[in-house]
Amino acid sequence: MTKKIEAIIREEKLNDVKNALREIGILGMNIHEIRGQGRQGGVELTGRTGTYRVDLLPKIQVNIVLSDHNVEKTVETIREAAQTGNTGDGVIFIYPVDDTIRIRTGERGRKALTYPGDIDERRAGQ
């Protein structure tokens, strides 16, 4: 079975997360620029015209689909790379994926998810 990891992180942590994922062999991912609000409910800013609240902050959403056995290592890698220790570091969701189909080749399941040099290939070589 496969899983989808959806991580919502701070914009400034994107390169740290991408580099950490690449180091463990996660090569395929999608990135989306989003706006959101979590527990902190936004931030208060003070300008020349007074104080105002910004409740939808810019974030980055990272989506990765991978084999079950790679989920924990990937989640921990994202968590460590994205963590600042401050409010608003983000959240990670894990979803089941019923199937995956590579459009170009028609490959399904695990074959549709593998890349040369990815985490599964590295694991098989150990």
Image (cartoon, rainbow, N blue to C red):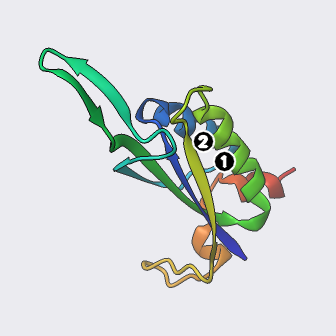
Query: Which residue, given by chain and number where applicable, does mark 1 sit on?
Result: 25
Q: Position of residue 8 (x, y in %)?
A: 50, 48
The extreme front residue here reads 50
Q: Position of residue 31 (x, y in %)?
A: 42, 51
Q: Position of residue 51 (x, y in %)?
A: 24, 23
Can residue 121 be seen in this snapshot? no
Dot 2 falls on a residue whose secondary structure is: helix
Q: Which image quadrant is residue 103 in?
A: bottom left
Q: Position of residue 11 (x, y in %)?
A: 41, 35
Along the line of sight, the residue nearer the viewer: 78 or 89: 89
Along the line of sight, the residue nearer the viewer: 7 or 68: 7
User: In the image, what residue occupies the spot 75% across and 66% down?
Assistant: 68
Can residue 125 be seen in this snapshot? yes
The three-letter amino acid code for the residue at tag 2 is Arg
Dot 1 falls on a residue whose secondary structure is: loop
Residue 22 badge: 2
- Labels 2 and 1 touching (C-beta < 8 A): yes
The three-letter amino acid code for the residue at tag 1 is Gly
Give the Cα distance between marks 2 and 1.
Answer: 5 Å
